[in-house]
Image (spheres, rainbow, N blue to C red):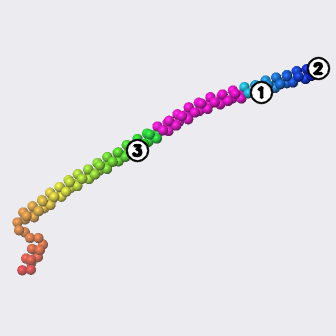
Amino acid sequence: RNVVAEEVEGLRRLLACHGEEKCRALRVVREAFDEEREEARVLQGHFDLIDRDAAVSVREESVLEAVLRRERMADSVLTAGAVALQKLFRGRMDRLLVAKMKKKKSKGGGKKGKKGKKGKKGK
Protein backbone atom coordinates (compact mmCIF):
# COMPACT_ATOMS: atom_id res chain seq x y z
CA ARG A 1 0.00 0.00 0.00
CA ASN A 2 2.82 2.41 0.78
CA VAL A 3 4.30 1.79 -2.62
CA VAL A 4 1.07 2.75 -4.33
CA ALA A 5 0.65 5.80 -2.11
CA GLU A 6 4.20 6.86 -2.84
CA GLU A 7 3.65 6.45 -6.58
CA VAL A 8 0.43 8.45 -6.42
CA GLU A 9 2.18 11.17 -4.39
CA GLY A 10 5.06 11.24 -6.89
CA LEU A 11 2.66 11.52 -9.80
CA ARG A 12 0.73 14.28 -8.00
CA ARG A 13 3.95 16.27 -7.45
CA LEU A 14 5.02 15.69 -11.04
CA LEU A 15 1.62 16.79 -12.27
CA ALA A 16 1.61 19.81 -9.99
CA CYS A 17 5.07 20.79 -11.16
CA HIS A 18 4.15 20.17 -14.75
CA GLY A 19 0.93 22.15 -14.29
CA GLU A 20 2.82 25.08 -12.79
CA GLU A 21 5.19 25.09 -15.77
CA LYS A 22 2.23 25.08 -18.12
CA CYS A 23 0.60 27.89 -16.16
CA ARG A 24 3.82 29.90 -16.29
CA ALA A 25 4.16 29.27 -20.00
CA LEU A 26 0.52 30.22 -20.53
CA ARG A 27 1.03 33.40 -18.50
CA VAL A 28 4.05 34.32 -20.65
CA VAL A 29 2.07 33.70 -23.82
CA ARG A 30 -0.85 35.80 -22.54
CA GLU A 31 1.47 38.66 -21.59
CA ALA A 32 3.10 38.54 -25.02
CA PHE A 33 -0.34 38.45 -26.64
CA ASP A 34 -1.48 41.46 -24.59
CA GLU A 35 1.66 43.38 -25.59
CA GLU A 36 1.10 42.49 -29.24
CA ARG A 37 -2.55 43.54 -29.02
CA GLU A 38 -1.56 46.91 -27.52
CA GLU A 39 1.06 47.43 -30.21
CA ALA A 40 -1.51 46.51 -32.88
CA ARG A 41 -3.95 49.04 -31.38
CA VAL A 42 -1.31 51.80 -31.47
CA LEU A 43 -0.32 50.91 -35.03
CA GLN A 44 -3.96 50.84 -36.10
CA GLY A 45 -4.29 54.39 -34.75
CA HIS A 46 -1.31 55.43 -36.87
CA PHE A 47 -2.72 53.71 -39.95
CA ASP A 48 -6.06 55.45 -39.41
CA LEU A 49 -4.26 58.81 -39.29
CA ILE A 50 -2.38 57.99 -42.48
CA ASP A 51 -5.63 56.99 -44.22
CA ARG A 52 -7.34 60.22 -43.12
CA ASP A 53 -4.35 62.24 -44.29
CA ALA A 54 -4.44 60.51 -47.68
CA ALA A 55 -8.17 61.25 -48.01
CA VAL A 56 -7.57 64.92 -47.17
CA SER A 57 -4.77 65.05 -49.77
CA VAL A 58 -7.09 63.63 -52.42
CA ARG A 59 -9.74 66.24 -51.59
CA GLU A 60 -7.14 69.03 -51.68
CA GLU A 61 -5.87 67.85 -55.07
CA SER A 62 -9.39 67.84 -56.51
CA VAL A 63 -9.96 71.39 -55.21
CA LEU A 64 -6.65 72.52 -56.73
CA GLU A 65 -7.57 70.93 -60.06
CA ALA A 66 -10.91 72.76 -60.02
CA VAL A 67 -9.15 76.06 -59.30
CA LEU A 68 -6.71 75.45 -62.15
CA ARG A 69 -9.58 74.68 -64.54
CA ARG A 70 -11.29 77.93 -63.55
CA GLU A 71 -8.07 79.89 -63.98
CA ARG A 72 -7.55 78.40 -67.45
CA MET A 73 -11.12 79.27 -68.37
CA ALA A 74 -10.67 82.84 -67.09
CA ASP A 75 -7.42 83.16 -69.07
CA SER A 76 -9.13 82.00 -72.25
CA VAL A 77 -12.00 84.47 -71.72
CA LEU A 78 -9.55 87.31 -71.07
CA THR A 79 -7.46 86.35 -74.10
CA ALA A 80 -10.53 86.24 -76.33
CA GLY A 81 -11.59 89.66 -75.01
CA ALA A 82 -8.13 91.12 -75.60
CA VAL A 83 -8.06 89.74 -79.16
CA ALA A 84 -11.50 91.23 -79.85
CA LEU A 85 -10.39 94.64 -78.53
CA GLN A 86 -7.23 94.51 -80.62
CA LYS A 87 -9.28 93.66 -83.72
CA LEU A 88 -11.60 96.59 -83.08
CA PHE A 89 -8.74 99.01 -82.45
CA ARG A 90 -6.69 97.90 -85.47
CA GLY A 91 -9.78 97.94 -87.66
CA ARG A 92 -10.55 101.48 -86.55
CA MET A 93 -6.96 102.57 -87.13
CA ASP A 94 -6.91 100.99 -90.60
CA ARG A 95 -10.22 102.63 -91.54
CA LEU A 96 -8.87 106.01 -90.42
CA LEU A 97 -5.73 105.45 -92.49
CA VAL A 98 -7.77 104.51 -95.57
CA ALA A 99 -10.01 107.56 -95.08
CA LYS A 100 -6.94 109.78 -94.74
CA MET A 101 -5.44 108.30 -97.93
CA LYS A 102 -8.71 108.82 -99.84
CA LYS A 103 -8.87 112.41 -98.61
CA LYS A 104 -5.27 113.06 -99.78
CA LYS A 105 -6.01 111.54 -103.17
CA SER A 106 -9.11 113.66 -103.66
CA LYS A 107 -7.22 116.84 -102.59
CA GLY A 108 -4.67 116.28 -105.36
CA GLY A 109 -7.08 118.15 -107.64
CA GLY A 110 -7.29 116.11 -110.74
CA LYS A 111 -3.70 114.98 -110.94
CA LYS A 112 -3.46 111.66 -112.59
CA GLY A 113 -1.31 108.78 -111.59
CA LYS A 114 1.27 106.98 -113.77
CA LYS A 115 -1.22 106.26 -116.47
CA GLY A 116 -1.87 109.91 -117.06
CA LYS A 117 1.84 110.75 -117.27
CA LYS A 118 2.41 108.08 -119.89
CA GLY A 119 -0.28 109.52 -122.01
CA LYS A 120 1.33 113.00 -122.09
CA LYS A 121 4.64 111.62 -123.34
CA GLY A 122 3.05 109.92 -126.24
CA LYS A 123 1.57 113.19 -127.64
Inspect the magenta stretch and tell me whether residue 40 lies in it: yes
- The type of residue carrying mark 3 is Glu
Q: Given the current orientation, which residue lies at the most extreme left position?
A: 109
Mark 1 falls on what kind of element?
helix
Q: CA distance from mark 2 to mark 1?
A: 31 Å
- Point out the image quarter for the C terminus: bottom left
Instruction: Please name the residue that numbered disc 2 is placed on.
Output: 1
Q: CA distance from mark 1 to mark 3?
A: 63 Å
Mark 3 or mark 2, earlier in chain: 2
Give the image quarter of residue 30: top right
Instruction: Please name the residue that numbered disc 1 is placed on.
Output: 22
Mark 1 or mark 3, earlier in chain: 1
Against 61, is 46 above or below? Answer: above
Residue pictured at 92% horizontal, 22% vertical = 4
Instruction: Please name the residue that numbered disc 3 is placed on.
Output: 65
- Point out the image quarter for the N terminus: top right
Residue pictured at 11% horizontal, 62% vertical = 102
Give the image quarter of residue 24: top right
Residue 63 place in picture, x, y as percent: 40, 41
Task: State the residue in front, 111 or 20.
Answer: 20
Give the side of residue 35 with respect to residue 52, left or right: right
Residue 116 place in picture, x, y as percent: 9, 74
Residue pictured at 7% horizontal, 76% vertical = 120
Magenta residues (range)? 28-56
